[in-house]
Amino acid sequence: MNTHIKIKVNFIFKLLVLILSLNFAQAGNNLTPSDTFDGNYLTASLVQVDNDLVYENVVMTISSVVSISGGTDYYANDYYDTKTNQLTIPQVTVGGKIYTNVIVKVGKIISIGGVLSSGIPLSGIWFYCKKIDCVDNMSKFKNFYTIAPSKSPLVLNTASNLSTNQSSVAKQADVLFDKNPYVALLLIDKDNIVFERYHPLVNNKTPLLVYSESKSFTSLAVGKALCSGLLPGLDVKMKSVNPQLTGLSYGEATIKQVLTMSSGAPRGTISSGGSPPLAPPYPNSPSSPFYYWDTFQVLKLFGGYQLDSTGNQVKAGQEFSYKNYDTLSLSFLFYQNQTNFFPEVFSQVWNDMKAENNSYWNYDRTGMVPTHSGFHAVPRDMARVGVTLKNIMQSKSTDCYTQYVQAAMTTQIKNNWKLFTNPEEQTSKINNGYGYQFWTEYVNDSTGTVYMRGALGQVLAINPNTGRIMVLFSYDESYEAQALDMFANWQKLN
């Protein structure tokens, strides 16, 4: 932060109090650590700098007030932009009153309590849970829908006597956990837990952000909506369900084409975590968490069409390319007749999964869910999801939802990443197939395992042939393949 800007504290204090009193509606949410301004110094409990570190208990002066918006405070921590020297504050307490969404210019840094430390490095615009409040702090948005668990949750027993191969894979898992940055790792065989281990700061009741595993959950919600008659079919264009998508590439694609990441919209890139390259900023640069305040505005920014290497437009259905905003557009299938029924539909999905705990979906300022990466769940409930989906894959039933899930977890399109001349667009090289928001055909596993995968090494691996399941939460995807290979090798043992 800039520590050299000289200020006139009393003037700034009077200006801040005046503007606050004129323009702010009082607000409060005990999930947000509120800053305080005492007339001389601003004290911030959590400050994220750019897209990187989070500092605790920062005391600073203010050089000027940039803007005041009021309203709901969407984010869990302050955000500091080094390029503009601006600090965006979700809440600030002045004179005993709480006000929201303040942007100020930073003056001088008086002191910093330290860098957020939980034994886990920071990554991207998320940071690891402070005091294990993962729903609040491990997300783009502070606000979330709470999804109630099943009234009849699946009982997960821990195997008491491990077989030879179970004992062998459990020992391998223990070694991997010791040397890799894993947060949680569970192995399930015959619907029993044969290995379960957690980072010291989490346990079997901790809700964690699943990142892009959210995409698979979104697909399950689409299937539930389809089979409930809320969607006319998978081969209709997205815009016919929600006219808001008219004129966007997502709207011109069919639901099935979007489910298979073949909308024809701009390709995702590795450096952007599956999002397209930079576009004109809204309202800040895409590196800012505030870029996601309004999901529809994001879709409009990236609603054009991809061009291939010869300069021709990529048509819907022509190619698979992993891109976050295909999934994000699916959120709009659940907004009909001025009603957002995504939480209601997903509640049915979560009930089907026989979950024991609440799960959580973040939402933006319009109430829309960031379906590409906004879901939180307890690791044990992810194991229950695995068992339920395994059972559906093994089922002989011909009902609509069973058939949808079986199709979703089967290769629907090939991942021909080698055709992309830009290496940045080769977003995944380890899976050769893709279903409806599920990964298939891991290059080192030919036994039929299906995968839900998230950005930092989150994995739910399900093998319907062997009945074995792996749940992985990590904070560095560089170590993901080791767990995938361990699971793949396990499938080859009797």
Image (tube, rainbow, N blue to C red):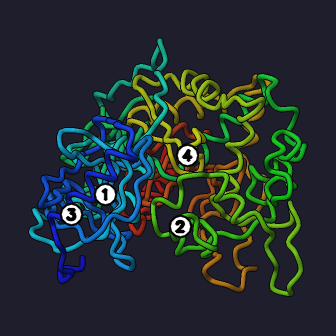
Tag nearer the camera, 4 or 1? 1
- Which label was assigned to residue 273? 2
- Which label was assigned to residue 78? 1
Give the percent coordinates (x, y) of residue 5: 21, 81
Q: Secondary structure at mark 1?
A: strand
Which comes sooner in the sequence, label 4 or label 3? 3
Q: Residue furthest top?
A: 151
Distance CA(mark 4)–CA(mark 2):
14 Å
Distance CA(mark 3)–CA(mark 2):
24 Å
The residue under label 4 is 214
Q: Vertical placement of 6 versus 473: above or below?
A: below
Quadrant location of residue 206?
Answer: top left
Q: Is residue 398 visible?
A: no
Judge left or right: residue 338 versus residue 491: right
Q: Vertical placement of 212 versus 26: above or below?
A: below
Quadrant location of residue 216?
Answer: top right
Three-letter code, disc 2: Gly
Which comes sooner in the sequence, label 1 or label 3? 3
Three-letter code, disc 4: Ser
Q: Secondary structure at mark 2?
A: loop
- Which label was assigned to residue 55? 3
Judge left or right: residue 395 versus residue 147: right
What residue appears at the point 40 percent right and 54 percent down from the top-left corner?
Answer: 68
